[in-house]
Amino acid sequence: MGVTSPAGNIVHTLKGTSGDKFEFKALRSGMYKFCFHNPYSTPETVSFSIHVGHIPNEHDLAKDVHLDPVNGNIAELREALESVVAEQKYLKARDTRHRHIGEYIFLAAASGLQVLYIRKLFSKSVAYNRHSPSP
């Protein structure tokens, strides 16, 4: 794998490896070329990701005067985020509580139906035994 600068100079070379990470500093603006080479006759899969960053120079850096409004906005966002997190915790607790209530109602209903079913079974068997002929 090789990286070529806009002027045609090779700025980085990597041979015979896989899964490596590397970085380089582009000294000129323009289009850089990435070349992958497979010396074998078998097909290979190539997967890569490129992140382009910018390192500001001293003249481009913001001064404290420029950062005061930004810091105020960050504080407002922090407060809003904390409010959202608190709301999520409340809703999660409420959901858990409602699930428990639903389970209790379901268990009570199932128990009531079981009692009715057992009563019905016993009333039929008692009635059946009363009307059966005696020997």
Image (cartoon, rainbow, N blue to C red):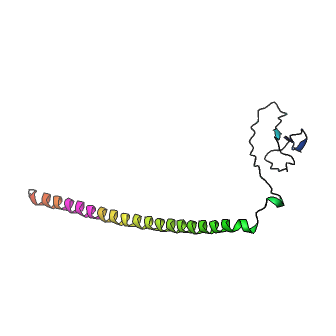
Along the line of sight, the residue nearer the viewer: 77 or 91:
77
Q: Hey, which residue is sitting farthest right in the picture?
A: 9
Along the line of sight, the residue nearer the viewer: 91 or 65:
65
Q: Residue at 89% x, 39% y: name it.
A: 7
Along the line of sight, the residue nearer the viewer: 23 or 39:
23
In the image, taking residue 41 as reference, residue 9 lies left or right, namely: right
Quadrant for the C terminus, please.
Answer: bottom left
User: In the figure, residue 2 lies in which quadrant?
Assistant: top right
Report the number of discs: 0
User: In the figure, residue 85 lies in which quadrant?
Assistant: bottom right
Along the line of sight, the residue nearer the viewer: 63 or 71:
63
Q: Hey, which residue is sitting farthest top in the picture?
A: 41
Q: Hey, which residue is sitting farthest front in the picture?
A: 65
The answer to whether 75 is drawn above or below residue 55 in the figure is: below
Pinpoint residue 12: horizontal percent, then vertical percent: 88, 45
Pinpoint residue 22: horizontal percent, then vertical percent: 82, 50
Q: Chief secondary structure of the magenta span?
A: helix
Pinpoint residue 39: horizontal percent, then vertical percent: 85, 33
Is residue 41 in the magenta section?
Answer: no
The answer to whether 36 is drawn above or below residue 79 in the figure is: above
Q: Residue at 77% x, 49% y: name it.
A: 52
Q: Which residues are magenta?
A: 111-122
Pinpoint residue 79: horizontal percent, then vertical percent: 58, 69
The answer to whether 121 is drawn above or below residue 12 in the figure is: below
Q: Residue at 72% x, 65% y: name it.
A: 66
Quadrant for the N terminus, please.
Answer: top right
In the image, taking residue 32 as reference, residue 97 lies left or right, namely: left
